[in-house]
Image: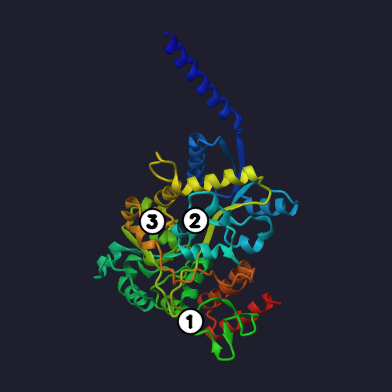
Amino acid sequence: MKKVLVFLLTAFVIVGIMSVAFAADKPVTVTFWNGWTGSDGDVLIEKVDEFNRTNPYNIHIEMDINADFQTKIAASFAADEGPDMILGAHSYKDTYPDYLIDMNEVFEKTSLKSDDFIKGYLDLCSKDGVLYVVPFQVTGRYMYWNKDLFEAAGLDPNTPPKDYDQWLEFAEKITNPDMNIYGSGVSYNAIYTNLQVIQRMGGLFITHDADGKLIPTFAGADGVNPGYAKFLNWFKGMTDKEINPIEADTTSMFQAGQIGIMPDGAWASAGADLAGINYGVAQLPYGDAGPMNPCSVSGFSITKYASEEEKDAAMKFVEWWHKGFEDTETTACLTWSLVCGFPGYYLPAINDERYQASEKLAMMTNTDNSASTTYMAPDDFTKTFQLASEVIEVMVEDVIVGNMDTEAALLKAEQTAEALLK
């Protein structure tokens, strides 16, 4: 009896010590801001709720999703305050470097390894050795094709065009005016899609000269950029032949079964699936500019306003997002690809059999470390939005809608881009 009492007392003391120790660990709240509204935001909410419910660290992620996130974070930083963690763009390394910590620390304080991330995406999120953003989502553009229209045109439905010349060749075969079917569906004003193709053909829109000075690349002493001219002539040739409509919303036309081949983002898959389109998706072909995977990367950043405790807790969440816990069936990182349709950047998720079972995800995934991920211009050029809307979009519309001569449009773009650099 005495032994039983001793055992019970010992057990009580141990449990008591454990309870006290657990209670002594104060709950840590991590404020987390982002702009992921919509259906993707619903997935994010589910995963954050899962972490809050299952993590053993007494951590609570207090998430604020706001459609005006960009405005809100800019105002917050200007007032010298902010949340502990955000989902920001890779360009934040240039916009807000003084407000973000070096996320390389996550590889020291957690079990995450930098070698498990595709190097090109980490490079895009880094500057001078400092990692400002741990990737969360890669946003690029891809080539979609309607397999049924390929088959009707006598083409192999499982083989997309290997280059832009073959794109044109296939588009000519697919076009059927009687059925209101166009072989190609490049939208004249989808500039963030078009510039992906243009860059593959002609390289960065802004670069450095021999002295390190930023200069535009639309035209120069040797004439106009041949790659950009090729894109404009390629696109204009297809609209003149009426195998590509002069249309803003070619995505809806693809979903209606009227487009054979089109460039678009990963989000186009959801609409095509809902419409019941039998389609394939692949990387956009490389062009004359060589291996290139221009994209934008959004990811986790921890701000300087996080305390040491909050910083460590935020890193635990970032670790969990990618690796889960021992009993996690599907990590948040993998879920984001499987449910939301975005290609991976984290090799353990990419190598998962469920990821590889998705032909679409596998085809969209670029693991070519030789492919440049630089988007539009070098890091020290910060007016990319103006470059896209005031220069590149205008250039395309001048040729496609306004019938301006290609060389004249490129010379005009050069002058406008030069003005942005002053």
Q: Which residue is mark 1?
A: 227
Check disc 1 and give the amino acid type.
Gly
Q: Position of residue 223 (x, y in %)?
A: 55, 90
- Residue 137: numbered disc: 2
Depth check, front residue: 86 or 342: 86
Check disc 3 and give the amino acid type.
Ile
Count of numbered tags? 3
Depth check, front residue: 340 or 131: 131
Tell me, yes or no, if residue 330 can be seen here: yes
Q: Earlier in the sequence, mark 1 or mark 3?
A: 1
Q: Residues within 10 Å of mark 2 (few under 14, many from 20)?
A: many
Q: In the displayed structure, would residue 233 be above or below residue 132?
A: below
| Foreground tag (1 vs 2) | 2
Q: Earlier in the sequence, mark 1 or mark 2?
A: 2
Labels 1 & 3 near each other (Cβ < 8 A): no
Q: In the displayed structure, would residue 167 be above or below residue 77?
A: below
Check disc 2 and give the amino acid type.
Gln
At numbered mark 3, what does the secondary structure look like: helix, strand or loop? helix
Q: Which residue is mark 3?
A: 350
Q: Position of residue 357 (x, y in %)?
A: 31, 54
Tell me, yes or no, if residue 39 can be seen here: no
Spatial distance from mark 1 to mark 3, Cα to Cα?
Answer: 33 Å
User: Looking at the rendering, in which quadrant would you find the C terminus?
Assistant: bottom right
Left or right: where does residue 130 sit relative to residue 117? Answer: right
At numbered mark 1, what does the secondary structure look like: helix, strand or loop? helix
Left or right: where does residue 385 sit relative to residue 111? Answer: right
- Residue 193: numbered disc: none
Q: Residues within 10 Å of mark 3 (few under 14, many from 20)?
A: many
Q: Residue furthest right?
A: 79
Tell me the quarter of the picture where residue 290 sits.
bottom left
Q: Residue at x 37, y 69 (%)?
A: 182
Tell me the quarter of the picture where residue 60 sits.
top right
